Image (cartoon, helix red, strand yellow):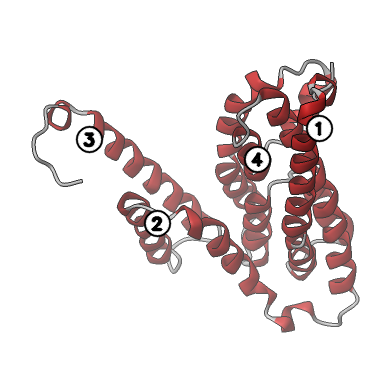
Amino acid sequence: MSPASELSVDDEAGRRRVVRNALAMGLATGAYGLTFGALGVASGLSLAQTCILSLAMFTGGSQFAFVGVIGGGGTPLAAAATALLLGARNTVYGLSVGPLLRVRGWRKAGAAQLVIDESTAMSIGETRKPLARVAFWATGLSIFAFWNLATLIGAVAAGALPDPKALGLDAVAPAAFIFLFAPRLTSRTAWLTAGVGAVVALALVPLLPSGLPVIAAAVAVAVLAIATSRRATGPDHSAGSGDAS
């Protein structure tokens, strides 16, 4: 039974709202695909390689990380490792939305490809399960379509330029990261984590090949997160030791 067929007549307005929001999300997010397409070509990838990255990887942060490392002279292995680290969060998203979607067979593989920040957020934002499922599929498919179309347009446009790097596209990836992660810096712990990652990466840039400083920063942040979690659940904290929040 499809998510839409589970909805009653009274839910039709909700379904139209969810689909409308999903299309708007797809159009807004897909616009970044123009930047990725241009950056991919400027980083030395072919048009086909750039488009395949969007089709197969389909997670913006990891894609920008991959071409950023390649464009900076890093090895494909370092680029893949960096992209894999950033994309690991999608595994956690999958554990959250998997029981809700209840898909099997080939639809399970399709759903896994659409598990991204936006589809997960839109899905868990709905209180009714049928609408949550519509939100996931509509948002994921909308962004997938617009993102890949925009990637193709951006790559073709950049490929037609004599020197795409002259446009300063090497600054696009860092700027995109700041835009994506800035809304998540809502606590002192988040700012501390971001600061540790930035300091470690900047300190290692002169010492390590391109791509490895990002991986080292991710490891440092993971260690910090584990230490912070243990401290928050430790006996001193639970006993109300008076530690500042």
Residue 220 in percent (x, y) is at 37, 48
Give the class, few, some or many, for how many residues have Cα within 10 Å of label 1's Cα (few <14, many ≥20): few
Whole-number angstrom distance, CA of label 1 to CA of label 2 = 42 Å
Q: Considering depth in this image, is 119 or 161 the residue closer to the camera?
A: 119
- The answer to whether the residue labelled 2 contacts the one labelled 4, judged by CB atoms less than 8 Å apart, is no
Mark 1 element type: helix
Judged left or right of residue 177, residue 236 is left
**Is residue 62 placed above or below 199 in the rendered structure?**
above
The residue singled out by tag 3 in the image is: 231
| Amino acid on which disc 4 is placed | Met
Judged left or right of residue 132, residue 54 is right
The residue singled out by tag 1 in the image is: 12
Q: Residue at x 47, y 57 (%)?
A: 213
Judged left or right of residue 94, residue 32 is right
Q: Quarter of the image holding residue 16?
A: top right
Q: Considering depth in this image, is 4 or 138 the residue closer to the camera?
A: 4
Q: Considering depth in this image, is 226 or 240 the residue closer to the camera?
A: 240
